[in-house]
Image (cartoon, rainbow, N blue to C red):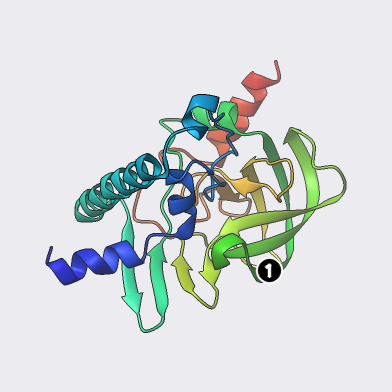
Amino acid sequence: MSGDSLLDVMEQIDAVYIEEAAGSPETVPGRKKEVFPVAENYKSKKKLSVVIGIAACLAVLLAATFIANQAGWISIGGSGQKTQISSQDAYWFANAEEMVAQADLIFTGEVTKISQEAGENDLPYAIYNVEIDTVYKGDTGGDTIQVRIFGGESDSYSVQNDLTVAEGGSYLFCMETYESEAPCILNDTQAVFDLTTGQAATSSELDPGFALEDVMEALETLNE
């Protein structure tokens, strides 16, 4: 990677990672919120030590970003004023049982509306309004629910994911829930299933490894 390319990657590092390096971590999309206590003796260190620590963290992050980009684990590119991001799966499951165990909320329902919004740091999300049919795990809190999917367009970012969900379609959703935000799917390859086809609602070239019937069998086993 050339020096200019390396600088381009650094410029695309989201502000949230800089805040994490400084000791004030925020939520990364698709991950649960974590709180990291700061020791009192850390607070008393000189400002120079803090600056050096942040610089070291950023250097490690930059190196990791370069390696991951080269390996194909993440995809970051520029297009004019808008950063292009390919959504990557936060989790990958060997089988349906693993996914069912990981999910906080599993339900079926019809998608009645799909809208777009920009979240923290202008990251784009698709919002699915879903009319609930059956809840298999967890609590939806009512007959309808909003599902939050990382992807779409904002002023700063264009995020592509592999979901093939459409308004009017009926699906099974396997979700991760949060205290103050709409639930998110576990990943966009294995966690949403089309009730008509019985297959994962994804355009990914990756094989999900299991179908809707496998998820239903895992749910039956869970509820025994």
SS type, badge 1: strand
- Quadrant location of the N terminus in the rendered image: bottom left
Considering every residue shown, the one lying at the far right of the view is 142
Q: Identify the residue at horizontal 59%, vertical 63% (top origin).
A: 125
Looking at the rendered structure, the kind of residue marked 1 is Ile
Q: Indicate the position of residue 18 as horizontal and vertical percent values.
A: 43, 52
Q: Indicate the position of residue 6 as horizontal and vertical percent values.
A: 21, 64
| Left or right: where 175 falls relative to 209 | right
Considering every residue shown, the one lying at the far top of the view is 224
- Quadrant location of the C terminus in the rendered image: top right
177 versus 197 height, above or below: above
Nearer to me, 37 or 180:
37
Q: Identify the residue at horizontal 36%, vertical 65% (top origin).
A: 12
79 versus 198 height, above or below: below
119 versus 107 height, above or below: below
Which quadrant of the view contains residue 14? bottom left
128 versus 186 height, above or below: below
Would residue 123 be visible to someone looking at this image?
no
| Left or right: where 176 falls relative to 21 | right
Q: Indicate the position of residue 145 as horizontal and vertical percent values.
A: 78, 52
Nearer to me, 58 or 89:
58
Which residue is identified by label 1? 114
Nearer to me, 147 or 14:
14
Would residue 15 be visible to someone looking at this image?
yes
Total tally of numbered discs in the picture: 1
Which quadrant of the view contains residue 191? top right
Q: Indicate the position of residue 55 as horizontal and vertical percent values.
A: 31, 49
Q: Identify the residue at horizontal 30%, vertical 62% (top origin).
A: 10
Callout 1: 10 Å neighbours few (<14), some, many (20+)? some
Q: Identify the residue at horizontal 38%, vertical 60% (top origin).
A: 13
Considering every residue shown, the one lying at the far left of the view is 2
